[in-house]
Image (cartoon, rainbow, N blue to C red):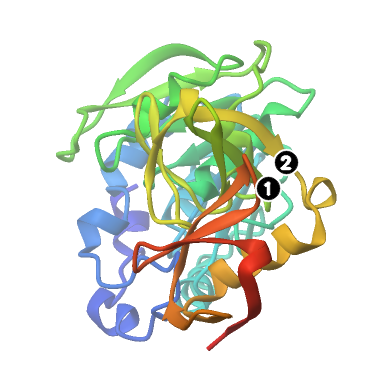
Amino acid sequence: MNEFLSKLQVNYELLEASVSHKAGSYFGLNSSALLTDLSDYLSIFHYFSNTDHFVEFGSAYGFGPLIFSHLYPTSRSTGIEFEEVRYNKALELKESLGLENTHFIQDDLLTAQIPEADLYFLYFPTGMILDRILFELSHFNHSFRIVVIESHGDLLARFQMETWLSEEFEIPLKSPRHYPAAKVFSSGGVKTPSVFDFSFKTNYFLIRELLDHHWIGDSYGFEWHSEDRINLIHPPLTIELNQITDILNESDIQHDLLKLLQLRAMGEVKVVTSARTYQAFIRKIYLIPRLMFEMSTGERLNYDQVLLIDSI
């Protein structure tokens, strides 16, 4: 096995220098932050000799799928990787090792088709990619397990919120991590609808501010802040989950309100009223008691006061 592992060597600094700076690329991480330790893969795979298909989300240079395929040549492994540089290196290693039971996919986990498997593995922070993966997996009809390594201190807490997953056991890790063991979860429970089902979708939260004031926040891209709070992107505010009174689709929203929501997401706007001209960002867009919006300069404008509004 040591001889095989010695072949899984890459010039990390050279390859990572070519990685894009796009969101989701995790550019600039040191190797221990990006990659799972090879000895930890061995420890984990020891428990899953009867696995038919192993899938790793964010497989980087493909070390996990390659080790799994080498250990279990009658099984299959798949790695899904976003970054082309890492994906290409994984293909190169696969060819050099002659592992025909390994498959690599270059795709965005926000939209990629998730293969059916009986073992999944992930090691990355929480966020809408994780929310989307968990949402898709929760609708699979077959039984499977997920192995999770804590990355930034809140991944395991996020998993505990998934009612359809049950924690089975832990596997001690040899490399230092935020939590010293990988946790193994199994599917089979009943999924409870959750606000996390909307972080990767274009929906809108109706948010209570006062008894008679409700404003609209975009669901797309929000991040979990704590057990009962989330951070919105549009507008950039933290809200409590109990402030959300409804979740709306675009089809539920009137044209004038939808235009304001779209302009808010685009950035700075020019607003002309009979009294003056504003150049600022749209923050809160109120639906109740009437359609009005709050500018980054602090003013609140009724929509029927506006003569012209457009992006800059």
Secondary structure under tag 2 reads: strand
The residue closer to the viewer here, 95 or 27, is: 27
Instruction: Identify which amino acid the numbered label 2 is placed on.
Output: Leu
91 and 281: which one is in front? 281
Compare marks 1 and 2 and give the one earlier in the sequence: 1
Q: Is residue 19 left or right of residue 197?
A: left
Q: What residue type is disc 1 on?
A: Asn
Q: Which residue is drawn at 62% across and 40% down?
A: 288
Give the quarter of the image for residue 187. top right
> On residue 248, which mark appears?
2
Please say whether residue 73 is visible from this viewpoint. no
Identify which residue, 20 or 238, lies in the foreground. 238
Callout 1 crowding tier (Cα within 10 Å): few <14, some 14–19, many ≥20? some
Q: How far apart are marks 1 and 2 (CA)?
A: 6 Å
Dots 1 and 2: beta carbons under 8 Å? yes
Residue 160, position in %: x, y? 43, 19
Residue at screen point 81% across, 54% down: 254
Q: Which mark is residue 217?
A: none
Please tell me which residue is depicted at 45% across the width and 13% down the height of the picture. 167
Residue 253 position within the rendered picture, expressed as x and y whole percent measured from the top left: 78, 50
Q: In this view, does 263 lie above or below 103?
A: below
Above or below residue 199? Residue 97 is: below
Q: Tag on residue 203?
A: 1
